[in-house]
Image (spheres, helix red, strand yellow):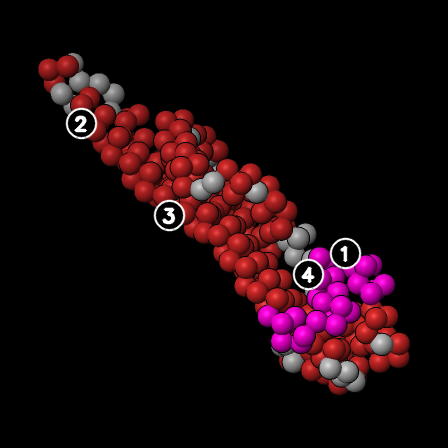
Amino acid sequence: MNITYIIGTIGAFVVMVIGMILDLSALSTPGGQLINFGKVMNFVDPSSIFIVVGCTVFVLVASFPPSALAAIPKHFAVMMNSKKYDPMNFIDQLVELAQVARKNGLLALEEKGNQQEDPFFKQCIMLIVDNNDADQAKEIMMNDIEQSAARHEDAAAMYDKAGAVAPAFGMVGTLVGLINMLKAMDVSSGGGDLGPSMSTALVTTLYGCVLAHMIFGPIANQLRKRDEEETLCKLIIVEGIMSIQSGANPKFLREKLLTFMAQKQRDGEGKK
């Protein structure tokens, strides 16, 4: 569970709501009300929600293929799973494979490969079991990493796009509200209540900023973070597999693969 994302997002909304209902001027007023929950309704405007959320959604529909939009639930699953790619887990498995290979040969890794749940790890093992040329095998592995990273960047870019257009439609809502307000000021038409129009003009900008910086921005950043973690583990796998094919010593292999990690992580491994 990605606890930092949950805490950060909920915390941002809580702080915003507290700011909406808090009235510090009441401290200097006898009988003043410091917390006024009724003020929250001042920031609820159906027209603003309709404009900002509706237009943002349909711009995404117009900008991305159905397959990208259908993958949104998968994006949230990936974003919330912060434990899937653990470098130490892959390093331990690679060291074990190196021990098996030195004792029984590369063909003995076929069974281990078939037991792998990670498709990339399994593919890499099978490439050396099939005795492919080392350079060609590494080329295949690196190409897989590059294409995977490109797909992940496309997913994050969708939320970047949403974060860019939401404030823009907040400004569109502001213009709509101002136009309606100016129309209502026409004396010949009998005037009118300027409050709702002015509210739409201001609140849409708020909704656009909230969507961009509290919803879509963190999602894009979290997806890129998951991609960095996955890419690191895949690079460790590639380096480990190529070293196993060349007959590297398991102890040396562990030390070599630990260099992919920060010093603090290596020190923590040494204390286990």
Q: Distance between the residues labelled 3 and 4?
A: 34 Å
> Which is in the foreground here, disc 2 or disc 3?
3
Residue in front for this viewpoint, 24 or 8: 8
Mark 3 or mark 4: whose residue is earlier in sequence: 4
Name the disc covering residue 120, or none: 4
**What secondary structure is the magenta-colored segment mainly?**
helix
* Residue 90 visible from this viewpoint: no
Q: How far apart are marks 3 and 1 (CA)?
A: 38 Å
Q: Which residue is at a point 36% across and 43% down the rendered structure image? A: 165
Tell me the amino acid under the disc marked 2: Leu
Q: State the image coordinates of residue 268 (x, y, percent, origin top left).
A: 72, 76
User: In the rendered image, which residue does mark 2 sit on?
Assistant: 182
Residue in front for this viewpoint, 159 or 145: 145
Q: In which quarter of the image is residue 152?
A: bottom right
Q: Which residue is at a point 85% across and 63% down the rendered structure image? A: 111
Label 3, secondary structure: give it: helix
Q: Dot 2, how many residues are within 10 Å of its Cα: few (below 14), some (14-19), or many (20+)?
A: some
Tell me the amino acid under the disc marked 1: Glu
Q: What stretch is highlighted in magenta?
A: 110-139
Does residue 127 belong to the magenta stretch?
A: yes
Q: Which residue is at a point 80% across and 77% down the rendered structure image? A: 98
On screen, residue 202 versus residue 94, left or right, reads left
Q: Distance between the residues labelled 4 and 1?
A: 9 Å
Q: Distance between the residues labelled 2 and 3?
A: 28 Å
Tell me the amino acid under the disc marked 4: Phe
Q: State the image coordinates of residue 19 (x, y, percent, origin top left).
A: 44, 44
Does residue 159 belong to the magenta stretch?
A: no
Q: How far apart are marks 1 and 2 (CA)?
A: 63 Å
